[in-house]
Image (cartoon, rainbow, N blue to C red):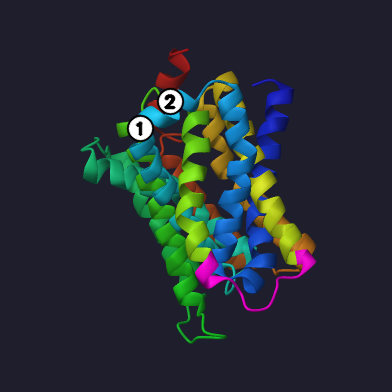
Amino acid sequence: MTPRQAGELLLLAALWGASFLFMRVSAGEFGAVALAAVRVAVAAVVLLPIALVRGRGGEMRRHARSIAVVGLVNSALPFIAFSYAAMAITAGLSSIFNATVPLWGALIAWAWLRERLPPARALGLAIGFGGVLGLGWDKASFAAVDGISSGSAIVAVLAATALYGFGANYTRQRLDGVSPLAVAAGSQLAAALVLVPLAALAWPPITPSALAWGAATLLGVLCTGFAYLLFFRLIGQVGPAQAMTVTYLIPLFGVFWGWAVLGEPVTTAMVGWGAVILLGTAIASGVVGGRRVAAARAKP
């Protein structure tokens, strides 16, 4: 990875880490469904013209049904869940729990696709989910404040990451060989078609402020549309294995943005249990102590 590519990887992590900040700022005024709808609609406006100019329209039509499923499980539902959680827990905490995506991916691949789960990866799963339990143990209260509890918010985040894990395996199973840009643009369009009518019913009675609109727009343009393009660029240049290392950087930026912009506290528990989650994720995904890294390097 060249210095420029490393810089792009850091930029991608910063953008995806900032998504938790923007949701934290805007979710309270929009509500979970309306904010998710704005996010995917804006992202679709960014991605669709690029996909069509690059000749991906035919792919989107041929694989419309599978791409629509990806739009539902990889964007519409998780974005609602994360927006809901943002109304009760900090941006930093959400970003740390988000690091469990590869854990869910490995677990679902084992249960659904019968992918082999060596002892080292099973240990990684146990360590990672142990970190989730430790981090959530003193944070999860089901006493509702303004109708939302921290416990239900944590459950929502973990449900979203499980959906991401399912979406990754579904994409590998049903959309192998399809252009990532076609999947991204088509899935955002499909998510928008599902969420925009729902948002019309769930639109907040009080018009969101300019600050909330600004955060929601940046969430769609930068953290979804532009971030997808950057991610696909990295996949093409350095391969998926190195591009996916962004997973380990997102919590650092998520915690940083929450602390720097919103003054969210960074506790010892967040740092310690977050490190445990990342360690378990690295082991479960083969980055530490596995053979997948060597195999990835052996192939162009």
Residue at (62%, 42%) from the top-left corner? 45
Residue range (magenta): 200-211
Along the line of sight, the residue nearer the viewer: 48 or 69: 48
Asked if marks 1 and 2 touch (Cβ < 8 Å), the reply is: no
Q: Where does the image place residue 52, in percent across and percent down from the top left?
A: 56, 27
Q: Which mark is residue 54?
A: none
Please name which of the two marks, 1 or 2, marks the residue nearer to the observer: 2
Foreground residue, 278 or 169? 169
Q: Nearer the viewer, residue 231 or 9?
A: 231
User: Label 1 to label 2, Cα distance in Å?
Assistant: 16 Å
Q: Amino acid at mark 2?
A: Glu
Q: Earlier in the sequence, mark 1 or mark 2?
A: 2
In the image, which disc is placed on residue 172? 1
38 w.r.t. 234: above or below? below
**Quadrant for the N terminus in the image:** top right
Q: Does residue 165 show up magenta in the picture?
A: no
Q: Secondary structure at mark 2?
A: helix
Q: Position of residue 29 (x, y in %)?
A: 66, 73
Residue at 60% across, 36% down: 47
Give the SS element for disc 1. Answer: helix
Q: Position of residue 13 (x, y in %)?
A: 65, 42
**Residue 179 appearing in the image:** no
Q: Image check: 184 left or right of 5?
A: left
Q: Residues within 10 Å of mark 2 (few under 14, many from 20)?
A: some
Outermost residue on the left side: it is: 114
- At label 1, counting other C-alpha atoms closer than 10 Å, the crowd grade (few under 14, some 14-19, many 20 or more) is few
Q: Is residue 250 left or right of residue 182?
A: right
Q: Which residue is mark 2?
A: 59
